[in-house]
Image (tube, rainbow, N blue to C red):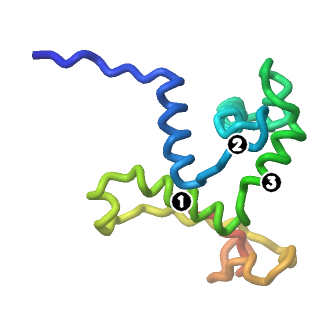
Amino acid sequence: MHLPPCTLVPKDIYRYAATVLQRHLQWSDYGSKCTVTTLFQLLFYAAAQLCSLCAACNRLRDAPSDQAVRDGLIALCPDAVTLEAQWNRSFAEQLPPAVKHQRWRLAIDLHLRPYHGQPHRHPDEIYRRQAKGGTTHFHAYATG
């Protein structure tokens, strides 16, 4: 017996993402125009279109003003550390149990770019290693 194909449409993906995030963020509506639903729609739209919230508000017909959206986000979002923890919990919740409770080997590439200047703000910005490219100082980039 063949199972019918499962087709996800953008509305399903939005609803799932909004439900997961709302469970962790626990936002409440910020006025009649800046509801949680509206804020999520604008945030997801801006992310999908690679545009600013201001541009998203201007492009969407019934969106509140960009200032109203900023005010709502400022009022609803906790400090950056708490917000990051909430987002991380929402992402971790989506992982299958086998992934959550096992150690996994990861491949990471370390890329070193020779650097001959001074650190911008802090000495730890510069990675030091055996001489290569005429210097022992590098900017290090890792990919996994």
Picture coordinates of residue 96 (x, y %)? Answer: 32, 52
Q: Nearer the viewer, mark 2 or mark 3?
A: 2
Residue at x 73% of width, y 81% of height: 124
Q: Which residue is mark 1?
A: 88
Residue at x 66% of width, y 47% of height: 28
Q: Secondary structure at mark 2?
A: loop
Q: Give 18 or 102, whichever is nearer the viewer.
A: 18
Picture coordinates of residue 32 (x, y %)? Answer: 77, 34
Q: Earlier in the sequence, mark 1 or mark 3?
A: 3
> Hey, what amino acid is under mark 3?
Ile
> Hey, what amino acid is under mark 2?
Asp
Q: Earlier in the sequence, mark 2 or mark 1?
A: 2
Residue at x 41% of width, y 50% of height: 94
Q: Which mark is residue 29?
A: 2
Q: Is residue 69 above or below residue 94?
A: above
Badge 2 vs badge 1, beta-carbon distance below 8 Å = no
Residue at x 47% of width, y 21% of height: 9
Q: Which mark is residue 119?
A: none
The reply, left or right, for residue 70 in relation to residue 127 is right
> Hey, what amino acid is under mark 1?
Asn
